[in-house]
Image: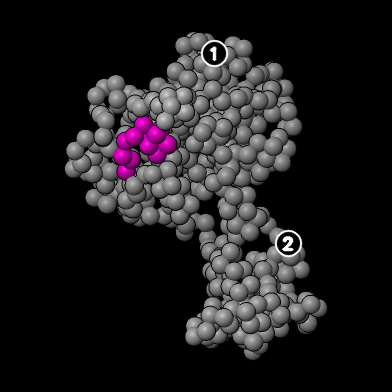
Amino acid sequence: MSQSSAAPAIAHNKPPEILSLIGDTPLVEATQFETGPCRLFLKLENQNPGGSIKDRIALSMIEAAEADGKLEPGGTVIEATAGNTGLGLALVAGAKGYRVLLVIPDKMSQEKISHVRALGAEVRIARSDVTRGHPEYYQDVAARLAEQIPGSFYVNQFGNPANPHAHERTTGPEIWEQMRHDVDAVVVGVGSGGTLTGLGRFFNRVKPRRGIEMVLADPTGSILYEYVKTGQLVKSGSWAVEGIGEDFIPEIADMSLVTEAFEIDDAESFAAARELLRKEGIFGGSSTGTLLAGALRYCREQTKPKRVVTLVPDTGNKYLSKMYNNFWMAEQGFIHRPPHGDLSDLISHRHEAGEVITVGPDDSLLTAFKRMRDSDLSQLPVVDKSGRAIGIIDESDLLVKVHREPSHFNDPVSKAMTDQLETLPPDAKIADLLGVFDRGRVAIVMDDNKFLGLITRTDLLSYLRLHMPKSSTPPEREFV
Ligand SMILES: Cc1ncc(COP(=O)(O)O)c(C=O)c1O
């Protein structure tokens, strides 16, 4: 083989170039919102390669550990998180050739676990129902693993000075340049406190004596808002916004930097994030909504014109099945449909609105099976051309037909479906539903001949949960 046709040599010991794309994110003005006398600018941290602001701290914490000799080639990076920090570390440490071990609480979604695994991280599942000090608490598990595994480095974003340092050194100066040295207020959230502490230190330095306000936007239920306002540590509640809000004050969070605080509930956060996507085309996560809502409140309260900056800390991709999904929003009580006061209030997917996945009597069993698999359903109503529900087909009906002879997947649905339907009128009672469930069936709600939708056990459970008194909802920990 001649020299010229040889493949170019791969430069070893050099991490992939994607790491050089962390940071230097764009900043845009939000022009479609009512901002009182102020101008509001958004720093698009969702455009980092790993999709969040945490790429910055992952890079900074790994580089600091390398410089301090805490992490050497062949070493293992350990962290307790399933949040964006886990993704950032899996990306950065993985690209640099380290083994990455993440301890993840068992309540985290499969999507997040799949994402870090796809990046090459190893995952250990820990209990999410125990608190600090319990041996199976996820942070204690991570600390113990770090003691046991030779050559390992426990990142600990909550106490690692390289976390705020990343923002003091990169995020702050970028905002300062992009705003042409003209900033009056910065609105942030606190998870580990890295963003607040790093940006607060930087802006105090460039415009001393609190020349730039640091405004906290905190989810209702977190203890931080109350701490800023009163100095009291109250009992935490629960909230659904991800990545920000705490039930303790993290070691690296310098709360004395906060000059003003707003408390934003989940409903307002989700509505603001959804509006941001529709009005400005910016696809942020749930905490983007909290920060935007806090920034808008701050702006509208001002009497003088101010230049205000907030962040879009992560991408909306991870929230497609939650905050951006109308069924999830309705199930959680964030979107309200006008109540009818009858069983139709329990129908999560309405046939009339085209929300029910159905199958026709002449479709093949294979079609029915694929539809069930694709939408994660275990049964489908069989609806004829006139829109009448004439049967129901579930996994056992399919199995009975195909278990001996898989070619029966080509048979029509009408041959396998159950036509003994458990139909209920909309004015039936919950007790009637329980009877249907006891017989192992789902309820088909029919208004005379009109098929309205199905009610499953899960629909009833979601409905009852929504009607549970707020005061009896147990607090939940946040994992950043
Ligand atoms: C998703 C998400 N994670 C983390 C953070 C901030 O975290 P930290 O306080 O750890 O810097 C934010 C802040 O806005 C966030 O939205």
Q: Distance of mark 2 from mark 1, alpha carbons?
A: 48 Å
Q: In this rendering, does residue 44 appear at all? A: yes
What residue lies at 65% left-to-right and 55% top-to-bottom?
A: 326
Q: Residue extending furthest front?
A: 1
Q: Which residues are magenta?
A: 90-101
Indicate which disc residue 403 carries. Answer: none
Q: Position of residue 369 (x, y in %)?
A: 58, 73
Q: Check disc 2 and give the amino acid type.
A: Pro
Q: Position of residue 100 (x, y in %)?
A: 33, 40
Figure quadrant of residue 146: top left
Does the segment drawn in magenta span residue 103? no
Q: Is ligand 1 less than 8 Å from the beta carbon at label 2?
A: no
What residue lies at 56% left-to-right and 34% top-to-bottom?
A: 46
Q: Position of residue 108 (x, y in %)?
A: 43, 52
User: Which quarter of the rendered picture does the N terminus lie within?
Assistant: top left
Figure quadrant of residue 350: bottom right
Among numbered discs 2 and 1, the one appearing first in the sequence: 1
Please tell me which residue lies in front, 34 or 468. 34
Please tell me which residue lies in front, 479 or 169. 169
Residue 271 higher or lower than 447, as above or below: above
Indicate which disc residue 211 carries. Answer: 1
Does the segment drawn in magenta span residue 94? yes
Q: Secondary structure at mark 2?
A: loop
Residue 112 higher or lower than 422, as above or below: above
What residue lies at 38% left-to-right and 44% top-to-bottom?
A: 120
What residue lies at 61% left-to-right and 45% top-to-bottom?
A: 270
Q: In this rendering, does residue 438 appear at all? A: no
Q: Give the class, few, some or many, for how many residues have Cα within 10 Å of label 2's Cα (few <14, many ≥20).
A: few
User: Which quarter of the rendered picture does the C terminus lie within?
Assistant: top left
Q: Label 2 belongs to which residue?
A: 338
Q: Check disc 1 and give the amino acid type.
A: Gly
Q: Residue extending furthest right?
A: 386
